[in-house]
Amino acid sequence: MMEFRTPVLPLRHEGLVVHDRPVIMLGSCFSDNIGRCLRDALFDVNVNPYGTLYNPASIASALGEIISCRRYGRGDLFMYEGRYHSFSHHSVFSGVSSESVLSGINSSICLAHEMLQSATVLCVTFGTAYVYRLADSGQVVSNCHKLPPSRFCRQAMAVDEIVGIWQPLVDRLLDFNPGIKIVFTVSPIRHLADGAHGNQLSKSTLLLAVDKLVSMNQDEAIYFPAYEIMMDDLRDYRFYAGDMTHPSDVAVAYIYDCFSKSFFDEDTIALARRCKKITRRLLHRPMSDDELSVRRFADSTREALDALLSTRPCLKRAVDKILIAR
């Protein structure tokens, strides 16, 4: 039988990602996608504690601040159009009260610092090699927060520049947590503001930089081929969302399946499936007006959850996050 695809085979790192050790996800919205899948399977995952970040310089800055557990103050914020913002954070942290913004930022950094100390895996996803700098200071910003374009200058990072920022940070991370593994990925989400060719140049820069970092840290760093799975394995617009740049839900599920086969052992795969069923029940919205059936469903969900936690108490923090979010 002829094969009409070029499948990308799973890596052989089974047992690296487990339920009883934290996983940290940093980077582009692809990190959000895989992080959401891990969260639904009740892994103890911290997804983008600075919000979605795209370029290697901003991701490196965030990781360095998490390691040092930096505390932000009023001077680190600016106000624009009635809201306080941080140039180091996504706009999900912005707000009308500087106190609440700082509380959210510092709480998120503190939690990420705590989890990074015992994490087995840090997943880093680079989205673009282009950075925006403040025109007056040269500071790289993670988010422009819709300020006038004249406030910024845009430039492409070079391979050696990315490696020069990240290699000292890898050394620092390994001093902080000697047992951690770094899984680098390049986001398959296309950035077409510069056209198809500009996007390819950007992705090529990221791929070369990651390849160099992995070769320099062969015992600690792994490359997961999310980009190649999307470009070479799926390779069809039916696997894209309506904007023709983001992977569809089906594509995300397929890449996550490749991720799980690469980094989960058989016991973890089985537990993840069981956990996902519990999550679906916890997030279920009853459509029936029959109070008895609704109560029975809630009771059976509670029984299933209690049975799970009785054998896997390490799942409690992940369950609590689901309960808070629903």
Image: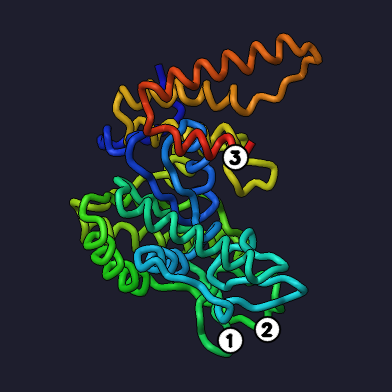
Q: Earlier in the sequence, mark 2 or mark 3?
A: 2
- For label 2, the SS is helix
Answer with left or right where residue 291 lies relative to residue 307: right
Which residue lies under the disc numbered 1?
135
Q: Is residue 109 visible?
A: yes
Residue drawn at point x = 73 percent, y = 9 percent: 292
Q: Earlier in the sequence, mark 3 or mark 1?
A: 1
The answer for how far apart the CA atoms under marks 1 and 2 are is 8 Å
Cβ atoms under marks 1 and 2 closer than 8 Å: yes
Residue drawn at point x = 42 percent, y = 25 percent: 309
Which residue lies under the disc numbered 2?
150
For residue 256, above or below residue 22: above
Q: Amino acid at mark 2?
A: Ser
The x and y percentages for residue 189 are 54, 51
How many neighbours does mark 1 have within 10 angstroms: few (below 14), some (14-19), or many (20 or more)?
A: some
- For label 1, the SS is loop
Which residue lies under the disc numbered 3?
324
Q: Nearer the viewer, mark 3 or mark 1?
A: 3
How many neighbours does mark 3 have within 10 angstroms: few (below 14), some (14-19), or many (20 or more)?
A: few
- For label 3, the SS is helix
The answer for how far apart the CA atoms under marks 3 and 1 are is 41 Å
Residue farthest left in this picture: 219
The quarter of the picture where residue 78 lies is bottom right
Q: Amino acid at mark 1?
A: Ala
- Quadrant of image for the C terminus: top right
- Quadrant of image for the N terminus: top left
Cβ atoms under marks 2 and 3 closer than 8 Å: no
For residue 117, above or below residue 293: below
